[in-house]
Image: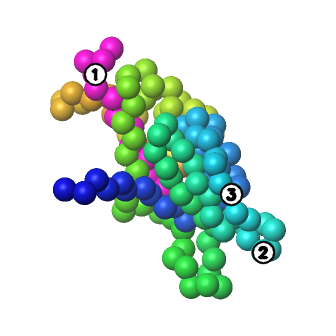
Amino acid sequence: MTKISVSPYLTVKGAKAAIKFYETVFDATCSNVMDAEDGERVMHATLMIQDNPVMLSDEFPEFDSEPGAVPGKGSPVAVSITVESPSQVDRIYGLAMENGSTKSFAPENMFWGDRFCQFYDPFGHRWMLLAPIDNV
């Protein structure tokens, strides 16, 4: 089987603020930002969370692009991140809450063997964090 890679592409309202949020909360690094011609929006950005790319852009209704998630409305898709330790789940969740996220499920040790939490970022996207409990 050919190796494939899956990377989320997020559409947001306020990509520059979203980039700062993801850098702060997930310790992401931004490797590529292409500003739109209007000088205010981001046409494309690539962030690395650990070794995983997450791409994003602002909304571009003039090009019939899909709208971004709407804060407070829920999101049918979640981005799941597995980290090495339960303490990382707690730390990242705390940073997310300090930086404007909305609680969905506070960190808890789950029956399937992971520390788990879920939250909505300020841009309406849903994130899940997991870490094996036995790595304590």
Identify the secondary structure beneath mark 2.
loop
The magenta segment: 122-136
Judge left or right: residue 97 versus residue 32.
Answer: left
What color scheme is it?
Answer: rainbow
Residue at 70 percent of width and 63 percent of height:
34
Residue at 36 percent of width and 62 percent of height:
76
Say which quarter of the image contains residue 113.
top left
Cα distance in 3D space between marks 1 and 2: 47 Å
* Residue that label 2 marks: 37
Q: Nearer the viewer, mark 1 or mark 2?
A: 2
Say which quarter of the image contains residue 87.
top left
Callout 1–callout 2 Cβ contact below 8 Å? no
Of residues 133 and 124, the one nearer the viewer is 133
Q: Position of residue 1 (x, y in %)?
A: 19, 56
Callout 3–callout 2 Cβ contact below 8 Å? no
| Labelled disc at residue 133 | 1
Identify the secondary structure beneath mark 1.
helix
Amino acid beneath label 3: Val
Q: Position of residue 42 (x, y in %)?
A: 69, 64
Identify the secondary structure beneath mark 3.
strand
Residue at 80 percent of width and 74 percent of height:
38
| Labelled disc at residue 33 | 3
58 in the magenta segment:
no
Q: Position of residue 97 (x, y in %)?
A: 56, 37
